[in-house]
Structure formats: structure tokens, C-alpha cells
Image: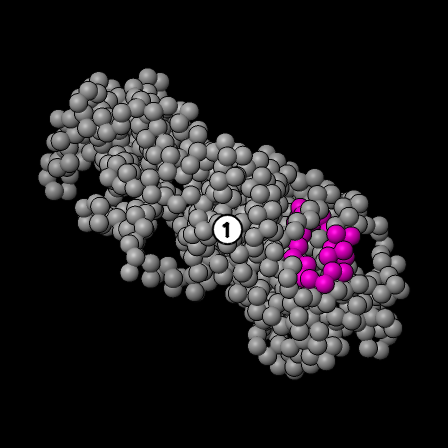
Amino acid sequence: MGRVPALDEPLKKHLGPATAKVLAEALDLHTVGDLLHHYPRRYTERGELTTLSELPLDEHVTVVAQVADARVHTFNGAKGRTQRLEVTLTDGYGRLQLVFFGKGVHKPHHDLLPGTRAMFSGKVSLFNRRLQLAHPAYELLRGDGDVAVDTWAGALIPIYPATTKMESWKIAKAVDSVLPFAAEAVDPLPGTLREGRGLAGLPEALTLIHRPRTKADVAAARDRLKWDEAFVLQVALARRRHADTQLPAVPRRPAADGLLTAFDAKLPFTLTEGQNKVSKEIFDDLATDHPMHRLLQGEVGSGKTMVALRAMLAVVDAGGQAAMLAPTEVLAQQHHRSVTEMMGELAEGGMLGGADQGTKVVLLTGSMGAAARRQALLDLVTGEAGIVIGTHALIEDKVGFHDLGLVVVDEQHRFGVEQRDALRGKGKQPPHLLVMTATPIPRTVAMTVFGDLETSVLDQLPAGRSPIASHVVPAADKPHFLARAWERVREEVEGGHQAYVVCPRIGDEEDRKKAAKRKPSAEDDAEKRPPLAVLDVAEQLRAGPLAGLRIAALHGRMHPDDKDEVMRRFAAGDLDVLVATTVIEVGVNVPNATAMVIMDADRFGVSQLHQLRGRVGRGSAPGLCLLVTEMPEASPARQRLGAVAATLDGFELSRIDLEQRREGDVLGQAQSGARSSLRVLTVIDDEEVIAAAREEATALVLADPDLEAHPGLRTALDALLSEEREEYLEKG
């Protein structure tokens, strides 16, 4: 057996067993290489104090500050007389409170005298409207001779991503133990690329990122390490794209005077310039003899469904079948309804009164009756149905196709890659694939998250869409604002319009059982109350501020027929207010709905709020979206809501969303369960690096698809692509 490479050796071989155990459990760091790639989050200069006024709530932080004041208070507690030590820190401008209780006050009372400088580590909370750290860990910075400072010879002290069990300075000491092994790091970047771009070698970059002497050292190290992350990922994606071009597919060209021509002739409006441009890109792909892999992204209401339908009709024209996969039954039914309405008699092929060049459009969902399901399956396997729209029920083994030519996936982030792959496997040859999303994605994210797909963007809204005004309603600070929100809903209804009220939870028996099983934690407080529920809020509105209006509830655990019935009644104008979960998030189209109130809006993500808001303002009347929250003004959640209220630009919001979730793994953390592969690269700020890396990777893979001349790069790819991740890209 050969020697294990130094960077693959377990940490317990070089650190104490207790330290190695905490690093593994708390930070998922197991090998020497893992620890060397755990880079400092930032650096503080010797003598420089951290700005205390900008600390994020509810996050674990490490700060360097000076003690301004320390006082012990004695009071009567449950177990007799007890003590509390309150220490005030300062950076010369802002202040931060530390608090220690009981037996834990003696050592800090002795250490933390006014004028003392130290590093403090803990979770930021709010008490009496002031920022505080409760029982923080600390390391004194006395200057000369002090271990904490003299660990580093330079003027910069690295601050590492840390946890309550492993503070930044302890991580720094662990890094010191393994830093000599950086010299043995295998460099994944080809020498010509490194030289051409003036990048440091990997061993040097690892040393500089952990122990820089100057800010220039940090910049050089980060520039190099960003390239590692961008290039290795882009090589993985370039190999995926290259492999796709080697697959066979049946070219699908629409007939000259076929179904598509007949459909276009029926349209009561002209397509936007964007729809025409994107349609041409798709038709060009469909005409090739290898599978199309295209991402179609566009703002809510930009007409993606129309573009996808024309692609499906083109494939039916060419003798194939098309399948559209929707994430929920409500959305599948909605798509089926709108497609059959748009096609008219063209959707009744082979039926009495149907058009000669028409085809059959069938719906297939898990809750269909046995007879209807049997007929739909028969229509698919015989080729009678050219188009099928359904949920994941389409993926089941018993579903067979006559000749599946195109798969359209709506809101792809809601599907596991295995599901998508199973559907693609139902074609005689790999079918063409069109992925649609209404969540706008910045260009660099598209180059990483969807790097194996070509991208088309619809950024023009069709004529007739109305503006949407958005406002944050701070229910806890200003309860009269919430009362006014319900008045506004009533005014919209009195004006002949309708409204949505969205809640994060259902509130049925199943919810109650889950809540009963949950053990209360020490953190349970007002901010941790259960999210508001559809059934409770609907009841309160009927009895209170919206009494007399026609109100119905809609959620995912209702019987499909009941869900469909509620949606039909709302669409027909027989209901005034729909109280719903996020089942209405995508695809639901009721032009008469002009107002939306989102309860506990802070419990939703930025993209989700933008999606929800897109359900109003779909007609000629202006839309109104009210974001209700009880979070305090200084909280990150309120800032997030403020950003959503401030712009309707989905691409701008997706940047904000990404900035807040930048630790997330672009390879799909939810899919692979692994920790983030991006440590210094940020897909927002490093657009130039990502674009250049994509170019270099594409050229390299074209010349050497199996990377035979690049063993270091192959090793780095193996590390990035664990089996699960490889599978994720394979099926992407």
C-alpha cells in the first residue's frame, strides 16, 4: 500500500483527539486538507477594533474590542442569591454588552478590567433593544509575549468561521499544526494557465491565506484560490456539456403548415420580441441531432408558458410527444387548463369537433380516478396524445410513451435530479430538455448552478401588465398598520377585485400532531412562536376584519378535487379572498386579483416573496403587496423585506438573495448534503473569474476530455465530485 498523501491524513493524527472530534462534528473538517481549505472569513489588524454597531443579529461572531466598564450585580434567584457580571465593550464609537451568570462570573471579572483588549466569540442577541453576547468565550490580547497575538508574526490576525464549541483562535492554533503540509498540496491548475494569468502556486496560496503579513498577501492568495474553485467546477460542467453533445437525439423540425402554424394563426396577440428570439433559439436546438439542454428563465408573467407550448407543438408537428412536468397538482391542473384554452379545437385531436391537424392534450396526476388514468396512459402509449401535463406521477414505471421527444420541466428547483432523469429515460433516445424558472438568476449563477444548460432569458413583460406597489407592515411596532392592511383589502374587494392572504403553515390536525411531538427548547420565545396558519387566519378574518366577505382556504393537504374547486371559484370571481399557503406561488393566473397580504413574510425567502407577489397585478388594475412581519427594525429579516419592497426587478432581488445565502453550495447543497464547495469565490462579485474559467475549461476539455494530461486536475475533480455530486451533475 502506498503512503497516504499528507492532505488526506486524518486530523486526529496531528491534533489532540478532543480538538479533532470537535472540528469534525462542529465544522465537518476531517482531514489535513479540509482544515487547510477552511479559510479565514476576514482579518483584523493588530490594534484595530471591530465595528460593533454593524454586528448581525442571531449570528456567531468574533470581535476584537476594549473593555469600557465591568460591574457585578447580586440578586435573588431561584436558588438563592446569585451574581451577574455585565461588561460593556467599546470600539470607540458603538457599544456591546456582555453578560455572565452564576459561577461563570469569577474568571471574567478578574480578566476583563477596564482598558483590557480581547477577542470575544459568541452569538449576537437583542436584550432590552441592545446588542449583547451571553457567556462569550474570550482570549486576551495583551500584546508582547501573549500567545494569542504572537501566534502570528504579521500584523494581521485571521478570524475564522467558528462555532460555540471551537472559537476562531483555537482554529488558528490547529491550522498552525498542519500548515507545513501545505507544501505537499497537488496543484489542480495547469502550469500554462497559472503562468498566463500570473497566479501563485497552491502551496504558496494556502500559506498566504492563513498567515499573511500584508493585505497584498491576502489578495494574492484569494485571487489564486478563487481560480481553483471556479476552474475545477467549470471543468466538471464542461465535461458534462461535452458528454451531452456525444448523445444521439432525433431532430424535431415543425411541419411547414402543421399544428404550430395553425396555433400561431389563432393567437389574438403578437408575440413579444423576446418570445420570438427565445423561440428561435429553442427551435434551432430542437433541429440538432443531439439533445437540447436549455434553461428558459424569465420574470413572473413574461410569457414562458407560451414559449414552452410552441416548442411542444413543434415537436408534435415532427411526429413526437412532449411532456410538461409541474411541481404541484394545482399547477399541473392550471397548466392543463390554460394550454387547452389557448389551443382550443387544436387540443381535441381525434375528437368530434377537433381540428384536423390537432392533437390530444392529457392531464396525468397521482389523484386521478382509475378510469381517467387508464385512458390517459393508453393515449400516451399509443401516441394518440401528443402533449401530457402532469406531476411526478409522469415518472412512475407504468407510464410509457409512444415517442417522447421533449421534456419541459417547470420550476426545476422543486424536482430532484433523479426524478428528472427518470422522465428523460422514457424516450427511445434521450429527449430534448427545456427547464423553465420564474426565479431570475444572475448570469454568473446560471454559469455555475446551471452550467451544463444553455440559457435563454425573457426579460420583456407582455403589454397590459400593471405595476405592483409593495410595503412592509411592521405588525409588532405599529399594530394600526396591520388594521389598515385589512381595510385596504376590503377597499380592493369593494372596487370589484379580489385578494390573496398567504401564510407559512396550514394549521390542520397533522400540524398540531407535529407541534405536540416537538420538545420546547430554551430558545422558545415570542420570536420563535409557530408560524401563522391558513386555517386559523381564515377563521380570524371571517370573524374579524374581513367579516362579510367571501373567504376560502387553500393548501396542499386538501383533496385535489377540493383544491381544484376552490381555484375554479376564485378564478370565476365567486370568492373575494383566498387564504393560502405557497401552493399559489407559481403558475396561478387570476387577473382580477389585485391585493396580496403575506403574513409572517420574514419566514419566506427573497425569491419566494417575489414569486408570490407576481400573482397580483396580472390584469389592467395596479397590484398591491403587503409584507407583514413582527421582526424588529434592526433585524436582517426586516432588511430583506425592505429590499423586496424597494424593487420589482427580479434579477436585482436574486443578487440580494444570493449575497445573503452565499455560503450555499452552487452544486446544490440540498441535493448532495455536502458542505459548501465555495469558500472564497462569490458568484456575484467574481463574474469575470467565472466567465474566464468557463472559457479556459471549455477549451481544455475540448482538447483533452478525459484530462489525461492533467492528473492534478483529475484529483481535484474527484475531491469536488463525491459520488453523489457526480450523480447530480450527470443527471443535471
Residue 99 falls within the magenta-colored stretch: no
Residue projecting furthest to the left: 80
Residue sitting nearer the eye, 241 or 528: 241
Describe residue 377's horizontal placement relative to residue 15 as left or right.
Answer: right
How many numbered discs sit on the rendered protein?
1
Q: Is residue 611 visible?
A: no
Report x, y in % for residue 370.
Answer: 62, 81
Q: Is residue 424 visible?
A: yes
Describe residue 15's horizontal placement relative to residue 627 as left or right.
Answer: left
Report x, y in % for residue 478.
Answer: 48, 34
Residue drawn at x 54%, y 43% as measured from the top left: 606
- Residue at label 1? 709
Against 547, is 425 above or below? below
Question: Which quadrant of the figure has residue 126?
Answer: top left
Question: Which quadrant of the figure has residue 402?
Answer: bottom right
Amino acid, disc 1: Ala
Against 354, is 482 above or below? above
Residue sitting nearer the eye, 612 or 717: 717
Please state, as top left, top right, bottom left or bottom right, where the N terminus lies in the image: bottom left
Residue sitting nearer the eye, 118 or 99: 118
Report x, y in % for residue 596.
Answer: 61, 46
Residue drawn at x 37%, y 47% as measured from the top left: 528
Residue 291 falls within the magenta-colored stretch: yes
Residue drawn at x 58%, y 64% as measured from the top left: 420
Secondary structure found at label 1: loop
Which residues, given as a range, are shown in magenta? 280-303
Report x, y in % for residue 225.
Answer: 44, 38
Q: 10 Å neighbourhood of mark 1: few (<14), some, or many (≥20)? A: few
